[in-house]
Amino acid sequence: MGTWNVKPFGNDTALDWVGSLEKAKDGSFLSECIDIIIDQANEPDAPECEEAVAAAAVIAAAASEPVRGISSEIKSWVKVTGFVPDKFLLKKSLRAIDLIATDSELENLWKEGDSFESWIKSLEVVRSTLKDALATDLPTRQPKPKSMPRLLHKLMALREG
């Protein structure tokens, strides 16, 4: 497990997952990550849990305006796609977080280390944000075209790609 902190994006799996998210055209990618956890009969594997925690963090952040608590790349994806989770996805995300925190390989791995309580607190932040979103009106958001990069090296990469 390539982990350097307890936050939702504090591991290699979640950062790799962000690359896949940036290619996604809508929120179905997030829903699929959550469904993998909910649909498993046995305790879910750690990499799938890390991806689902990242997905839940994006879903929680996208349920508010302005979007907070996620990287600029993910904020850009939310704005470009116009993604706003519905209440059903918020509820599924809560369920996935609960399963990960109580019956997953990832939970077992964190229990083996010294940071289990900190990891649980990090999950509780995501859980709390999801619950708060369920109790409020969700924002409305329209898809926006992706803006052109302002830095020369990013413009050159865009041209070469």
Image (cartoon, helix red, strand yellow):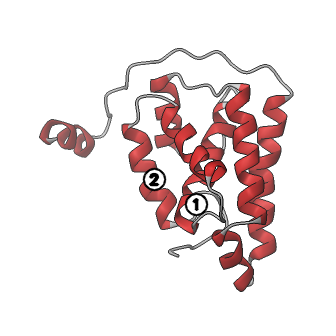
Residue 55: x and y in percent read 58, 46
Q: Residues within 10 Å of mark 2 (few under 14, many from 20)?
A: some
Q: In the figure, 55 relative to 89: above or below?
A: below
Residue 28: x and y in percent read 50, 32
Relative side of 102 to 85, left or right: right
Q: Nearer the viewer, residue 124 or 45?
A: 45
Dividing the picture into quarters, in which one does residue 109 lie? bottom right
What is the secondary structure assignment of the residue under circle 2? helix
Q: In the figure, 138 relative to 160: above or below?
A: above
Q: Residues within 10 Å of mark 1 (few under 14, many from 20)?
A: many
Question: Spatial distance from mark 2 to mark 1, Cα to Cα?
Answer: 9 Å
Q: Which mark is residue 50?
A: 1
Residue 58: x and y in percent read 60, 41
| Contact (Cβ within 8 Å) of mark 2 with mark 1 | yes
Q: In the figure, 74 relative to 44: above or below?
A: above
Q: Which mark is residue 118?
A: none
Amino acid type, label 2: Trp
Relative side of 4 to 22, left or right: right
Q: Nearer the viewer, residue 161 or 150?
A: 161
Residue 6: x and y in percent read 67, 67
Residue placed farthest to the front in the image?
A: 41
The residue shown at (13%, 41%) is 160
Q: Which residue is mark 2?
A: 17
Q: Which of disc 1 and disc 2 is earlier in sequence? A: 2
Relative side of 69 to 126, left or right: left
Amino acid type, label 1: Glu
Quarter of the image with the C terminus in it: top left
